[in-house]
Amino acid sequence: MQDEYDASLIYHKFRRVDGHAGIGGAGVNPARENVDSDGVSTFDSLPLEDGRKDLGQEMDLVVTKYFKQGLLPASVSQSFDEPSALIRLRAGV
């Protein structure tokens, strides 16, 4: 890509350290998509299973567009921690 753009593809694999520990109730509910014969999608909540370390995986694409070589005007940059101008889009599956 050009100097004005940046892209990253990030893979996450979520695992527990101790697969034999009990599952807590912290509001984390994995979901499974179901498609019926009419093509309607619904999601079911999957319970986490005791005795399993694998919690799932995710793929993220991060695309960044830099403006003005990444620099903001001095008057504006004083109100931000970073003196750069960018737009970042992150999408995960």
Image (cartoon, rainbow, N blue to C red):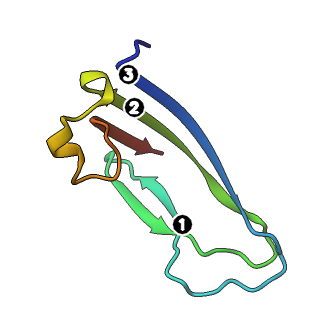
Which residue in the protein does label 3 denote?
Answer: 5
Q: Earlier in the sequence, mark 3 or mark 2?
A: 3
**Callout 2 amino acid:** Val
* 3, above or below 77, in the image: above
Q: Residue at x 80, y 83 (%)?
A: 21
In depth, the one of 69 and 23 nearer the eye is: 69
Q: Earlier in the sequence, mark 1 or mark 3?
A: 3
In depth, the one of 35 and 85 nearer the eye is: 85
* Callout 1: SS: loop
Residue 30's disc number = 1
**Callout 1 amino acid:** Pro
C-alpha distance separating marks 1 and 2: 26 Å
Q: Residue at x 51, y 31 (%)?
A: 8
Between disc 1 and disc 2, the foreground one is: 2
Contact between marks 3 and 2 (CB within 8 A): the answer is yes
In depth, the one of 28 and 50 nearer the eye is: 28
Residue 63's disc number = 2
